[in-house]
Image (spheres, rainbow, N blue to C red):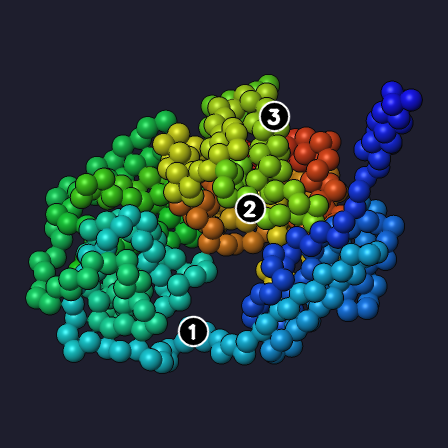
């Protein structure tokens, strides 16, 4: 009798183990009491699709998978939201403060600018320091990324940045925290040009300028020309123009000791049977390890989706003959600086960073869908367009556009660099695609084809 009872109990457990148990799971906001200073936010999560989901009594659409995303408005002060699904109920309090937003209008009038009685000199503290065209510590206003010990002449400050005197009526800006605290008051002898060199190695031309000290510079992109602007501390400007007889395949300027190196990459060749032969590509699977990235409606971590697509892309590119490297093959943390350094050390021709998209407060996760591609330097825009068109054409995601953005991995790499947002993890429909193995493989194939189509286009333009 006891034996029969045990069998019934085991059968009972097996029966219920096969039934999916749902509970209301709110992924975002991440706490029951939060501060969000935006006109709206959204609730993202999952629940039993057969139950009615409501937020403050209003019925919310639920995807057949159970995923949901709903934008809600926020009033100034305390906002209370009650979410119900079946017998589950959760209450969230979201506090919105009145925030005064200060922005900088890039006009001839500069408010709050404090001009010094005399010009001074400062030295940059760390490599990769942004020299900006406006006194705003964000966006695509970076003129260049300067190295440690570059000397700058400054004549004033505002918004926590020094104004840098490049030449007469030509100014830039640098964060005060990016330079050494000891400001030099007395005049400093201008840098002297000792020698110029030219070299050509593999895919690159090198212009080398030997100086007595490190001074600021930036590179200007024009239609068929690159211009290196070099600024001495006595206000003199020197320019080195480089005519381009082919589509630009990447460039960089950087110091090696006191030698300023201006590297311009030559055109990339396309082969018939192994189209990507002799081309080095670094694939960057975004996030990893402790850095999860965005979390989906169904609690998938972006880092895992990125890696799956990146690994399929690795196989595709290897099949096409490319020399391919991955910033990570496993679930591990890799810093942004290490990703860029890895790409530069491998002398990559192309750098592809794979991500899945999310949204800030104030946006609507049900309206935002599809694939977008980001670049920083104009030279990478045609590659971004080719990859986006290929993905949208093959996997039929919504065309979410190409954008110029100041992302660390694309602005600091010496390769043609793009960042791909394959789809939105917080959209209930896009996350189903992102979790689908066929979609992941087709997305990888589309990225590979997009690279090849880009190379074909520049072959035609250069013939």
Q: Residues within 10 Å of mark 3 (few under 14, many from 20)?
A: many
Q: Seen in the image, is 397 located left or right of residue 58?
A: left
Which numbered disc, 2 or 1, marks the residue that appears first in the sequence? 1
- Indicate whether 171 appears above or below 300: below
Residue at the disc numbered 3 = 316
Q: Nearer the viewer, mark 3 or mark 2?
A: 2
Q: Tag 2, which secondary structure?
A: loop
One can see residue 143 in this view: yes
Whether residues under marks 2 and 1 lie with C-beta atoms below 8 angstroms apart, the answer is: no
Residue at the disc numbered 1 = 104
Q: Give the residue drawn at x 82%, y 67%.
A: 58
Please provide percent x and percent y for residue 195. Answer: 15, 41
Q: Give the residue drawn at x 79%, y 46%.
A: 22
Please provide percent x and percent y for residue 274. Answer: 57, 20
Q: Residues within 10 Å of mark 2 (few under 14, many from 20)?
A: many
Q: Give the residue drawn at x 52%, y 24%.
A: 322
Q: Residues within 10 Å of mark 1 (few under 14, many from 20)?
A: few
Could you give the CA–CA distance between mark 3 and mark 2, rounded to whole angstroms? 25 Å
């Amino acid at each position: 009798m006891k034996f029969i009872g045990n069998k019934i109990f085991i059968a009972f457990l097996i029966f219920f183990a096969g039934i999916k148990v749902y509970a209301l799971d709110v992924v975002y906001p991440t706490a029951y009491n939060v501060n969000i200073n935006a006109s709206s936010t959204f609730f993202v999560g999952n629940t039993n699709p057969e139950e009615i989901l409501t937020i403050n009594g209003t019925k919310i659409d639920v995807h057949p998978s159970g995923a949901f995303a709903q934008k809600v408005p926020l009033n100034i002060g305390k906002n209370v939201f009650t979410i119900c699904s079946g017998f589950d109920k959760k209450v969230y309090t979201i506090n919105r403060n009145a925030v005064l937003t200060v922005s900088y209008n890039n006009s001839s009038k500069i408010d709050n600018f404090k001009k010094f009685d005399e010009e001074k000199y400062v030295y940059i503290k760390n490599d990769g320091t942004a020299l900006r065209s406006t006194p705003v510590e964000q966006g695509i206003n970076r003129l260049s990324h300067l190295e440690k010990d570059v000397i700058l002449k400054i004549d004033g400050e505002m918004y926590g940045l020094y104004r840098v005197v490049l030449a007469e009526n030509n100014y830039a800006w640098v964060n005060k925290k990016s330079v050494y605290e000891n400001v030099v008051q007395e005049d400093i002898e201008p840098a002297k040009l000792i020698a110029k060199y030219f070299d050509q190695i593999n895919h690159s031309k090198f212009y080398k300028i030997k100086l007595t000290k490190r001074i600021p510079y930036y590179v200007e992109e024009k239609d068929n020309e690159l211009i290196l602007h070099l600024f001495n501390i006595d206000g003199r400007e020197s320019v080195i123009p480089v005519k381009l007889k082919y589509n630009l395949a990447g460039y960089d300027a950087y110091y090696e000791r006191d030698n300023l190196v201006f590297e311009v990459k030559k055109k990339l060749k396309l082969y018939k049977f192994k189209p990507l032969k002799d081309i080095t590509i670094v694939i960057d699977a975004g996030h990893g390890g402790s850095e999860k990235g965005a979390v989906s409606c169904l609690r998938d971590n972006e880092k895992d989706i990125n890696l799956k697509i990146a690994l399929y892309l690795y196989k595709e590119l290897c099949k096409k003959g490319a020399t391919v490297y991955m910033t990570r093959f496993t679930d591990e943390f890799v810093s942004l600086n290490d990703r860029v350094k890895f790409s530069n050390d491998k002398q990559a021709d192309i750098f592809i960073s794979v991500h899945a998209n999310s949204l800030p407060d104030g946006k609507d996760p049900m309206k935002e869908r599809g694939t977008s591609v980001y670049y920083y330097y104009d030279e990478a825009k045609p590659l971004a367009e080719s990859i986006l068109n290929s993905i949208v054409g093959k996997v039929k995601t919504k065309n979410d556009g190409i954008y110029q953005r100041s992302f660390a991995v694309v602005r600091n790499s010496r390769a043609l660099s793009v960042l791909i947002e394959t789809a939105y993890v917080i959209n209930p429909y896009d996350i189903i695609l992102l979790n689908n193995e066929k979609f992941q493989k087709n997305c990888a194939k589309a990225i590979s084809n997009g690279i090849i189509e880009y190379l074909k286009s520049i072959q035609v333009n250069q013939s």
